[in-house]
């Protein structure tokens, strides 16, 4: 009996190690659908992800906790891995500070708490996990985007991306959607 418990505990530890050793990635998560007929638990998950409105975007890492929240809200959001070029555009064009002020290179270079000198350096640092969004004081965690130029894909916003819609996991294709929404 005790031998079985030890084996299950070691299996659980091995699974946790595998998850920790998994390659770190930054995920861009975009809310696609609104709040009508939204279940309460999914609504709470969206609030935890800071996705309170349609076309809002957040950038998170691929920790197990975030992946669980993303999986719970998969019928209302789309997500994928973001690259440094799109992160740079996102920060420079849609990055906002408190008081609805734009994030600028001047703000980053003058601020003593930030070790980077430009938005481009900051964006590569964020994608490479050398920096976090909280390193920039007063930076809002949400990017307010436009609806995509030429709309979502032919399947609409009620079908998964794998079937031609807009919802669910996109992988690297999220960069194309973000390009059209910035």
Image: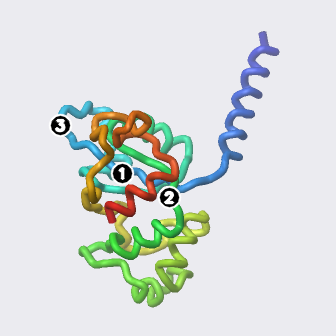
Question: In this orientation, does residue 144 appear?
Answer: yes
Q: Nearer the viewer, mark 3 or mark 2?
A: 2
In terms of sequence position, does the residue under pointer 3 or pointer 2 come before the other? Answer: 3
Q: Which residue is mark 1?
A: 30
- In the image, residue 42 sits, relative to residue 2, either above or below, namely below
Distance (Cα) linking label 3 and label 2: 29 Å
**Nearer to me, 45 or 146:** 146
Instruction: Answer with the quarter of the image where residue 162 lies.
Output: top left
Where residue 75 appears, x then y in whole percent? 34, 35
Q: What distance separates the C-alpha of mark 2 from that of mark 1?
A: 12 Å
Name the residue nearer the viewer: 159 or 59. 159
Decide if residue 45 is in sight here: no
Q: Residue at x 73, y 21 (%)?
A: 8
Q: Is residue 158 above or below residue 129?
A: above
The residues bearing labels 1 and 3 have C-alpha atoms spaced at a distance of 17 Å
Q: Residues within 10 Å of mark 1 (few under 14, many from 20)?
A: many
Closer to us: 29 or 175:
175
Q: Which residue is mark 3?
A: 36
Q: Which residue is mark 2?
A: 82
């Amino acid at each position: 009996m005790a031998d079985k418990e030890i084996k299950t505990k070691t299996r659980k530890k091995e699974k946790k190690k595998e998850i920790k050793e998994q390659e770190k990635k930054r995920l861009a998560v975009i809310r696609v659908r609104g709040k009508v007929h939204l279940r309460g638990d999914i609504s709470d998950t969206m609030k935890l992800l800071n996705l309170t409105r349609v076309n809002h975007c957040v950038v998170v890492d691929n920790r197990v906790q975030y992946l669980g929240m993303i999986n719970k809200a998969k019928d209302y959001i789309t997500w994928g891995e973001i690259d440094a070029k799109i992160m740079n555009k996102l920060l420079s064009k849609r990055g906002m500070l408190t008081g609805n002020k734009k994030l600028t290179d001047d703000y980053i270079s003058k601020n003593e708490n930030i070790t980077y000198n430009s938005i481009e350096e900051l964006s590569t640092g964020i994608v490479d996990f050398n920096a976090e969004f909280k390193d920039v004081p007063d930076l809002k965690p949400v990017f307010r985007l436009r609806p995509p130029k030429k709309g979502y894909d032919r399947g609409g916003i009620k079908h998964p991306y794998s079937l031609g819609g807009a919802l669910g996991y996109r992988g690297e294709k999220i960069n194309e959607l973000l390009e059209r929404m910035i």
